[in-house]
Image (spheres, grey):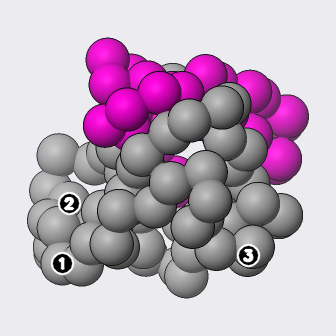
Amino acid sequence: MKELPAAATAYKKTPEFTEETVPAGLLKAHQTKEGTWGKINVTEGQLLYRILEPEFEEVLLSRELFGVVEPTILHEVKPEGKVRFHVEFFREES
């Protein structure tokens, strides 16, 4: 799994989503802006995180394993049953 840069600082957080409230846009290929990293935090259940480029990768996220979203990389998520999660957004400070 990817790691957040050491110099990255959090600046925004989404509300908590469930399998019923996850926005449709997160379920299909999407990306963050250049310079924006994401950290997918699962607080209950499991969430399948698919990194679509440059190489396809699937990771089953849980309370014990968070996901890292790299800037501009296409990705999507899929709830695996009952789930609760949110996304924190980070920027690298120069």
How far separated are the C-alphas under marks 2 and 1? 10 Å
Q: Is residue 94 left or right of residue 51?
A: left
Q: Is residue 93 left or right of residue 91?
A: left
Q: Earlier in the sequence, mark 1 or mark 3?
A: 1
Within 10 Å of disc 3 (Cα), the crowding (few <14, some 14-19, many 20+) is few
Q: Is residue 16 left or right of residue 61?
A: left
Front disc: 1 or 3: 3
Front disc: 2 or 1: 1
Asked if residue 46 lies in the magenta stretch, the reply is yes
On-image quarter of the C terminus: bottom left
Give residue 73's quadrant in the image: bottom right
Q: Residue at x 17, y 46 (%)?
A: 6
Q: Are marks 2 and 1 in contact (CB under 8 Å)?
A: no
Observer-nearest of 53 and 48:
48
Q: Are marks 3 and 2 in contact (CB under 8 Å)?
A: no
Within 10 Å of disc 2 (Cα), the crowding (few <14, some 14-19, many 20+) is some
* Residue at numbered disc 2: 8
Determine the residue located farthest toward the top in the rendered image: 64
Q: Which residues are magenta?
A: 42-70
For label 3, the SS is helix
Amino acid type assigned to the residue bearing label 3 in the image = Gly
For label 2, the SS is strand
* Residue at numbered disc 1: 11
Kindly identify which numbered label has been placed on residue 25: 3
Amino acid type assigned to the residue bearing label 1 in the image = Tyr
Give the x, y percent position of residue 22.
60, 64
- Magenta stretch prevailing secondary structure: strand
